[in-house]
Image: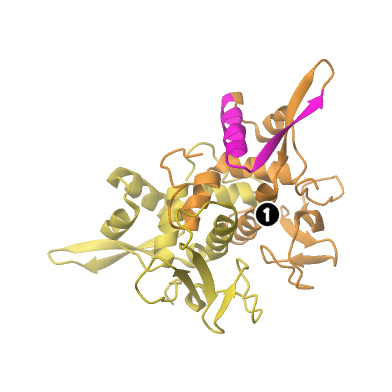
Chain colours: A orange, B yellow
Amino acid sequence: MALRSDWSTDRCPIARSLDAVGDPWVMLILRGALQGVTRFEDFKRSLGVADNVLSRRLNGMVDAGLLVRRPYRGEHRTHLEYVLTDAGADLLPVLNALTLWGEKHTTRPRPDVSMTIIHTACGTTTDSADTCTGCGARLAPTDVTWHKSWRDQPDFPLTGAPA
Amino acid sequence: MALRSDWSTDRCPIARSLDAVGDPWVMLILRGALQGVTRFEDFKRSLGVADNVLSRRLNGMVDAGLLVRRPYRGEHRTHLEYVLTDAGADLLPVLNALTLWGEKHTTRPRPDVSMTIIHTACGTTTDSADTCTGCGARLAPTDVTWHKSWRDQPDFPLTGAPA
C-alpha cells in the first residue's frame, strides 16, 4: 500500500516493510487486531477514525497480506470482519519495539499511565521486543499480554493468526 | 511531528511513538542516520527525496528529539548536519524488527538480495530486533552491522549517538 512512494520492490527490507506498514493508522489497526478487534465498527470506535480512512487502510492491509476478510452473520445480514494473518501477527515485535521506545522516550500524559509487555508463560515483564528477558523464549502474540495501567479489565493475551 | 492526528499525549506509548516516527520518510532517514549519514545532500541523494519533504522531516525529527543539528565547516561557509540523539539511536530495534519482518514476509526483488543483522562482538547473525541470539547481549548500534548482499563495500558498524 504505497501512500507516497512505491518501496515494494526495493532491495532493502526496511523499505519494503514500510511500504506495507509505514503508516500510523496501519500500525494502530494492527495494535487493535492483536488485541482481538476484527470488526469495522469496533476499529472505527476505538480509533476515532473516519470511515474512508479506515476503509482504505483495511483494504490495503488485505492486499498486503496482513489481514484476511472473513464473513460473519450479523443481526440482519452477513458482514465481513478482518482477521490477522501470520504475517500480520508477526508484526508484534515492531509494535513491542514502539511500545518500549515510547515508554522510554516520550512523555506520559500522567505519571501513573504505563504500558508493559508481559510474557504470560513465565510472568516476566520483558523489555525486549521479541524475546522474554526472563526465560529467553521467543514472544508469540498468544503468550503475551499488554498490561495497560489505565485499563480496568483484567489483562488478556494478544491474538495471533487463527490456526 | 503530527502529520495526520496528534497522538503525542495519548496514553498508549505505541500511539505516542507513532506521533514521532509513524512516517516512512522518518524511518528511512533514521536508517540513513544509523548508517552514518548526517548531511542534507547525502540524505537527499540516498533517498531520492524532494527538498521540501526532506527538510520538513528533518525539522520534525529535531523537534521530536531524534536528531540534533551540529554545525560543520563546508568549502565556503558553515552548514548544519543532523546527528542522532540517544533517543534516535534507541530506535534501532524498530528498524531491526522491520528488517526481520521484511526479509520474512515481503518479496525480494531478486533471490540473491538479502539483509542480515550481525552482532559484531560475537559474529552472530541475529534474528532478534534487540538481542543477540548468539551471546544474549543487548544490541547497541555500535555493536551491530547491517550486512547487505548488494553492497560492494565491507560491512561497518552502525552509528550511535556521539558520546
Q: Amino acid at mark 1?
A: Leu
| Residue B111, horizontal then vertical, whole percent | 48, 59
> Is A142 or B1 nearer to us in this picture?
A142
| Residue at image point 25% right, 68% down | B72
Q: Residue furthest bottom?
A: B122
Q: Residues within 10 Å of mark 1 (few under 14, many from 20)?
A: many
Q: Quadrant of residue B130?
A: bottom right
Magenta highlight range: A52-73
Residue on which disc 1 sits: A92
> Is B125 or B7 nearer to us in this picture?
B125
Chain at tag 1: A
Task: Using the rendered image of the protein, determine whether residue A34 is visible from the camera's viewpoint.
Answer: yes
Q: Describe the element under mark 1 as helix, strand or loop.
A: helix
| Residue B39, horizontal then vertical, whole percent | 29, 61
- A17 relative to A56, above or below: below
| Residue B58, horizontal then vertical, whole percent | 37, 53
Task: Using the rendered image of the protein, determine whether residue B20 is visible from the camera's viewpoint.
Answer: no
Please indicate whether residue B18 sits to the left or right of residue A67 in the image: left
Whether A68 is among the magenta residues is: yes
Please indicate whether residue B79 sits to the left or right of residue A57 in the image: left
Quadrant where the C terminus of chain B is found in the figure: bottom left
| Residue A38, horizontal then vertical, whole percent | 74, 35
- B22 relative to A144, above or below: above
Q: Total number of numbered labels?
A: 1
Q: Residue furthest top?
A: A76
- A74 relative to A126, above or below: above
| Residue at image point 45% right, 58% down | A12
> Is B33 or A101 nearer to us in this picture?
B33
Whether A37 is among the magenta residues is: no
